[in-house]
Amino acid sequence: MAADRVLIFDTTLRDGEQSPGASMNTAEKLEIARQLVRLGVDVIEAGFPVSSPGDFESVQRIGLEVGDAAVVCALSRAVPKDIEVAAAALSTAKRPRIHTGIGVSESHLADKLRISRDTAVERAVAAVRLARTFVDDVEFYAEDAGRADPLFLHQMIEAAIAAGATTVNIPDTTGYTYPEEFGALIADLRSSVDGIDDVVVAVHCHNDLGMATANALAGVKAGARQVECTINGIGERAGNTSLEEVVMALRQRRTYFGVDTGIVTREITRTSRLVSTITGIAVQPNKAIVGSNAFAHSSGIHQDGVLKERSTYEIIDPADVGLAGSAIVLTARSGRHALSHRLAELGYEWVEAEFDGVYEDFLDLADRKKEVFDEDLEALMADRERRGEEVYHLEQVHVSCGEPGIPTATVELLAPDGQHLVDAAHGTGPVDAVYMAISRIVPEPAELIEFAVKAVTRGIDAQGEVTIRVRSEDGRIFTGRGAHTDIIVASAKAYVNALNRLIVSVKPSVAEEM
C-alpha cells in the first residue's frame, strides 16, 4: 500500500448498527453496502456473524454482492466458535477479512474478561492463528487500547503480528483519550513494536468526549493508515468517528497530512441521506459536511462574502460532497445583497430606487418568520404589485374574538384624499367582522362569493395567502389577494385589494388622484 494512502474501513453495518434504534434487516444492509461500494470504501465490516442468523446471512449476501470491489470483513471475539462462524459467513466473499481481538485495558481484563495478561495474550495469539487458517487477511483489535498500559499494549500487538495479523487495530473504545495522547500512542507503537512496519496500523475511535474525528486524524498524522468509521458518525453511545469528516479533513488539508483516501466524495451526501433514512437516525442540522446547515449562510455579512467569492466562508465546495451548491438562508439577519441576489434568481426586476421599499417589506416579513422562503418572496413581490392598484390602503386591523364573546374588528384605511378612516363592526366571526368594518368605510356595493386560504410555505410561522372573489352590482367578478403571517390581516388585505380593483374599473380617475 502506498504510504500516502489511508484506507477507509466502514463499520456502519456493524458498529453503526449498534446505535439504539438503528437495527437493519438484510435487505437494508445490502442497499447500504451497494452505496458504500459507490462511495469507494476499502473495507466493509458487514456484521458479527455469530451474534445472530440475520447477521450471518447479511455477511454472506454482502460478500456475494460486493465481489472484489471491497474487502468484506466479519467481526469475532477471540473465541474459536466466533472465528469459525465468521469464516463460514465469509465463504462467499472474494476478499474476506476476519476481525478478531480481545480487551487489553485493566478494566476489561479484570472486570469483564476476568483473566490475567498472560492469558489474554495466549487467547489473542490463538485467535489470530486460527483465523489465518481460514483467510489470509486477519485484523487484530486491542479493545480499549486508549486506557491500556502502553507496555502491555506493545506486548499484545507484537504477539498478534507474530501470529499472523495483517492489520492491527488500536481502538479508543471508550472515547477516553485526547488527540495529543492518542497520536503519541500510535507513534510510540510504530517506533517500538517489532514487525509493525509490515502491517497496517488502524485506528478506531469513539466520540464520548467529542474527540473521535480529532483522535483518528491524530492517529493518521502519527502513521496510522486505516481509519475505522461510520456514515454520519453513528454507533455505540455517542457514536464513532465520522467517515465524512475524516475523508474531507484529509482531502482539504492534504498538504498538512500528506495523505488522501480513495473515497468518491461526490457520493458522501447521498450515502449520508440513505443511512439516515434506513436507520431512522436524523442528522443534526449543524453536523459537519452532511448537516442541512453545513453549507447554509444566514448572516448578512457571510452571505455578502459568499456571493462575492464562495471561499470567503466555505473551505469545501458543496459540489465536492454531492450538493448542488450553497444555501443562502434569508432571515432578519440577511443583508441587501443576499435579498437582491435571490430575487434576481427568481426573475424579478426593479428600479434601484424602489429597492429600499422592497428591503423594508422583506425585513418586516423576516421579523415575523424564522426563515423567508422563495414562496414568501413571491408573495411579497405580488403584494407590492397589488399596491400599484391601490385606492384605499390597509393601515391596520385589530380583532377581538373567542368563545364566549362577540367577534369585533376595528379597521383603519388610508383614503385617496389622505384621510385616515377608522371604523368598527361585529360579525359572525373575525373575518366577517373585518369585512363588515371595511364595508362601512368603503361604501362600494360588493358581494363576497368565494373565499379561499392556503399556506404559502411550510412551518408553523408560514404566511397564509387569502384569495377572494366579489361580485359587483352589475354582475362583474373581481379577485383580491393578500398574504401575511396573520391570516386575519391577509383576509383584510385580500378584501381591500378586490374592492380597489372594483373601484378602479368603475372610477379610473380615482386611482389617478392617488
Image (spheres, helix red, strand yellow):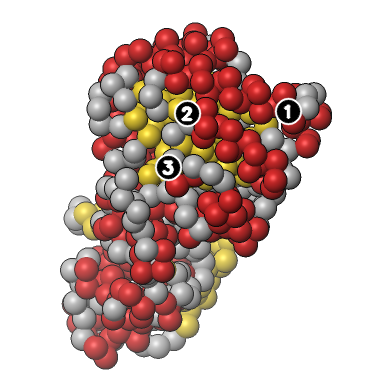
Task: Depth check: give the residue in front, 505 or 179.
Answer: 179
Name the residue located 24 percent from the left edge and 88 percent from the top edge.
352
Whole-Å distance between the Cαs marked 1 and 3?
24 Å
Q: Earlier in the sequence, mark 2 or mark 1?
A: 1
> Where residue 1 sits: x, y (%)?
32, 45
Q: Can residue 278 be seen in this view?
A: no
Can you say whether 504 is above or below 212 in the image?
below
Can you say whether 329 is above or below 388 in the image?
above
Residue type (three-letter) at the residue carrying disc 3: Asp
Whole-Å distance between the Cαs marked 2 and 3?
11 Å
> Where residue 509 sits: x, y (%)?
20, 82
> Where residue 326 sits: x, y (%)?
32, 64
Name the residue located 49 percent from the left edge and 63 percent from the top edge.
369
Can you say whether 499 is above or below 513 in the image?
above
Q: Which of marks 2 and 3 is nearer the N terminus?
A: 2
Task: Judge from the rendering whether residue 322 lies leftward or rightward of residue 215; answer left or right.
Answer: left
Disc 3: which residue: 198
